[in-house]
Image (cartoon, rainbow, N blue to C red):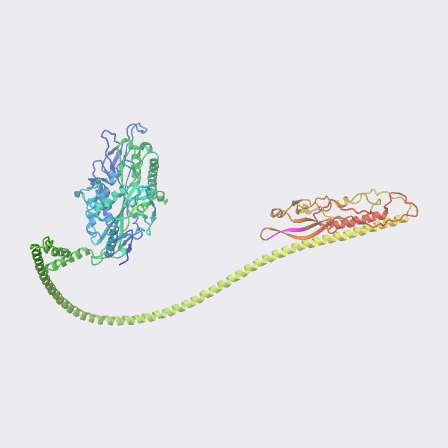
Amino acid sequence: MSRPVKGKTPRRPPPKYAPSSQKDPVGVYCRVRPLGLEDEECCIEVISSTTIQLHAPEGFKTNRNGEYKETQYSFKKVFGVSISQVELFEHVAKPLVDDLIHGKNGLLFTYGVTGSGKTFTMTGSPGLGGLLPRSLNMIFNSIGPYQAKRYVFKTDDKNGMEVQNEIDALLERQRRENNLPVPKTTSSRQKLDPEIADMIKPEEAYKADGVDEDSSYSIFVSYIEIYNNYIYDLLEENQEDAIKPKPPQSRILREDQNHNMYVAGCMEVEVKSAEEAFQVFWRGQKKRKVANTRLNRESSRSHSVFIIKLAQAPLDADGDNILQDKNQVSVSQLCLVDLAGSERTGRTGAEGTRIREAGNINQSLLNLRTCIEILRENQMCGTNRMVPYRDSKVTHLFKNYFDGEGKVKMVVCVNPKADDYDETLLVMRFAEMTQEVEVARPVDRPICGFTPGRRHRNQAFKEELSRKLEERGGPIDRDVPSVINHLAHSLPPLPSSELTDPNDDITLPRLIEALQNRHRIRQMIIEEYNKAANMMQSMLQELDGNLISKDNFIHEQNGRLAEREKIIQSNRAEMDRLEKKTKMQEHKIDILQKTTKIYEGDKRSLQQELETRDQRLQREQTDKRRMEQRMHGVVSDTQHKWEKECERRVNAKQLEMQNKLWVKDEKLKQLKAIVSESKTPGRPDPPPRQTQPPQRSSREERIPAKRSASPSPLPTTTPVRQLHRRSRSAGGEKWVDHKPTSSLDLGTVLQPVIPNAIQVSAPSEKALSKCDRYVLTHQEVASDGEIQTKLIKGDVMKTRGGGQAVQFTDIETLRQELTTVPGRKRKSSEGAPANGERKDGAWTDVETRCSVAMEMRAGSNMGPGLEHHGITKRRKP
């Protein structure tokens, strides 16, 4: 069994368009429907065979001069009310059918308002067949004798065509016939619907000229409708379910490998006669959506598309079988479209579903009009606007025709009654604009290069062979069944053998006589068979003699061929010598090419190595620069950190030394004062000095005023530095004061106050991003039971990832304790003390001052940014 061969859908692999000069305009025809009533007002007048004139009805809006405006429109052909269906077909559809048979595509659609006669023009009625049945009739009248057997051509699911040999087609035909539930009747006319019977009269039949007799043809038809912008297959066979009927499934549009649009999954039926094809059409026509409106009793609610696809393939060189070459299979198609009429819901009285149907119909017709307008604008003005074919299923399906896939014709149907004047005016304008659109003419290509007339020669040869066999008495193929039937009926029938009586002497003799008669006839048949066998034997002997003579002739011709063969051998030897020389030269060329390839390979490898080293060098340089930048950043950060650390240590050391120096000076001054007082015991206490001492820091100001009566003398050295530093926030630093919820507010030195700080109970990234310094207040109970406060300080630093980190730099510990100084009371002179208020004595004042100095020294270690409310004052108990 051979494998099916896929054929091409279009006649040309990609559609090749003719030059700009070879373009055909869209053929637009006009048909006027007769009036329903004779006394009804008419608004259309046929002026000539190509022109009509529209008259505004009475009561219609006039122009500025008060007169009715009359407009004229021209068409390729105008068909009045008296024109028959035959004349319309001859001018409009017949050229498209001729093109279809010769491998060209065509598109014909009817356009007009509702109730204008579009369906009648396309389908017709019994005895008045429309364009569709007449097209089918002409096709089968033209290709009837040249049709291929059923299932030789097969459609695939991708808008393509497959061709297979007759054996595979026979098996396919038997398989499908066995699957049919009801056997086919012999006569197709017995199944025709009375509504479609005798659509065409025999004298009105047409036949195409110039049909290629050396090709085999097959016709496939499909029928779809576009309802509410959805595509439905009208030939789809659904299982009837009276309880829960299954709704029809919508189909989708696809694009095949040659960029032609087709309906995917659409059923294509192979037909072998015009009656069968029209019956398939009528079966789908009954499923089409129609409804009764105020203007039309059977108004089409969808656009119907009937597609006739013609597949043809040439015969082989013998003219007997179809050529099994997929490149020689040609497929052409003719689309007959019955567009639903545009309507106004106010006039039709549509409600509910009918309003939605009317809206979708008008929208699809508007999209068709928009596409035509843009095509016309692109061709006349030289613009390149995109044509919105995809906005509607109608325009998307027929996009290829407007791009040059075949001829396009339109029949504009109009109703001359005055009520349709407004809609007819719009239809006329659209038709006038459509005539200005030109469609490129496709370029044909020859089907094959075989000699024409192959079918006729093969048929003549078969007839001559049959005639000679008949003259010689031999059976021919078509006479075999008749001979067998003649032999079967030539024998006399056997009489009845039923014995009803044992003394019956009639039945057995009659049966014996019949058997003897049949034996005699059998002997005669055997004799005739022997005569025929002897005649066949003599004929075979004659054929053997002819074969021997032909063998002798062939032997003689073989001798001549041997001589020619010697000449060919000598020429072949010369050719071998030249081929060897050529091979030697080619070998040298190969060596040079290989050497060149080696050098080129070395060159490429060196270039690649050079590029690799350059890339490696660039990467190393990039890494080096990146490392330098990184080390520079690290060095800068480290340098900045150590500069701050050194500065802090230097400041702390300086402050410590200054405090020590100040303490020593104070002690020295106190000792001086004590020594001077010891020399003059009876001297009264000197009054306090009136000169204001130098301004001291806030910590010194907070020292209690109850001190020794004698003021401390001013130091003779440089002024003593303040005991603590103010906050550096004035210079731009801000602190994060982290005080946990467990901190105690004692109002003493144990609770430091940091000015210009953000106090938080838990540090956050947002708070750290706004500050430069960080301090954590931690309180705990010491080993001696006293509360001590630890101040953990650090610097807020930005990380490379964009966050913040705290680097701790110092920890300070603050404690509160009661200081008990042992009694060092200086004894006075031998007498009683001069004043009872000198109970503590000078020693007490000196110890107090020294204790204050030491406490101030301890407080100075808190560093910048911290101030204490006060310090503990030690007293002698």
Q: Nearer the viewer, residue 431 or 376?
A: 431
Q: Which segment did they paint magenta?
A: 793-799
Q: Nearer the viewer, residue 438 or 840?
A: 840
Residue drawn 20% across and 71% down?
Answer: 562
Rendered position, 362 above or below 643: above
In the image, is 609 to the left or to the right of 509?
right
Residue drawn 54% across and 59% down?
Answer: 622
Q: Quadrant of the N terminus?
A: bottom left
Rendered position, 638 above or below 293: below
Q: Nearer the viewer, residue 164 or 727?
A: 164
Q: Nearer the viewer, residue 209 or 717?
A: 209
Can residue 697 be seen by looking at this rendering? no
Q: How many marks?
A: 0
Give coordinates of residue 422: x percent, y percent. 31, 33
Q: Residue furthest front?
A: 502
Give coordinates of residue 840: x percent, y percent. 85, 46
Determine the main secondary structure of the stretch shown in magenta: strand
Find out whether residue 592 is within the magenta segment.
Answer: no
Can residue 425 be seen by looking at this rendering? yes
Find out whether residue 797 is within the magenta segment.
Answer: yes
Give coordinates of residue 572: x percent, y percent. 26, 70
In the image, is 212 to the left or to the right of 836?
left
In the image, is 592 to the left or to the right of 813?
left
Q: Residue furthest right?
A: 831
Residue drawn 45% across and 66% down?
Answer: 603
Give coordinates of residue 251: x percent, y percent. 33, 46
